Amino acid sequence: MKFLHDKRILKREFSPGDVVLLYNSRLKLFLWKLKSRCSSPFKVMKVFPCSVIELESKVGHLFKVNDQRVKHYLGSYDDHRVNEIITLYEP
């Protein structure tokens, strides 16, 4: 049974330059609920052989995490929001 389950799990491979989301989950003991959320996108700087990934934030801080805590991000790393002002004239 475990063989069938393991066969369906997709292998995630990360390479330097990929953009990933960091998955944070924590157990609140008093609420008895598992709270989970993904933080802002990070850039993969280096991949170590022991399933450790070095990430860089937008500010430039480097830190290492386990590869089970990250997942691929399909959006853009640089969020450039375009604001356009349109003036309306009455006829």
Image (tube, rainbow, N blue to C red):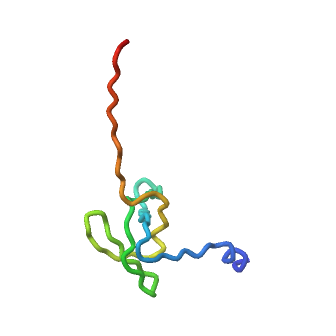
Quadrant in which the C terminus is drawn: top left
Given the current orientation, which residue lies at the most extreme top position? Answer: 91
Residue 15 vertical position relative to residue 39 in the rendered view, above or below:
below
Please state which of residues 39 and 5 is positioned toward the viewer in this rendering. Answer: 39
- Residue 64 in the image: state x and y as whole percent: 35, 77
Question: Left or right: where does residue 3 sit relative to residue 69?
Answer: right
Return the x and y of residue 23 as percentages of the image width and height. 44, 64
Rendered residue at 45%/87% (across/down): 49
Tell me if residue 72 comes above or below residue 31 in the rendering. Answer: below
Name the residue at 25% across, 64% down.
59
The single residue placed furthest to the bottom in the displayed view is 49
In the rendered view, tell whether residue 70 sits above or below residue 90.
below
Quadrant where the image shows the N terminus: bottom right
Residue 70 image point, x, y percent: 45, 69
* Front in this rendered view, residue 17 or 54: 17
- Residue under the point 34% across and 37% down: 84
Q: Position of residue 82 (x, y in %)?
A: 35, 44
Query: How many marks do you count on the picture?
Result: 0
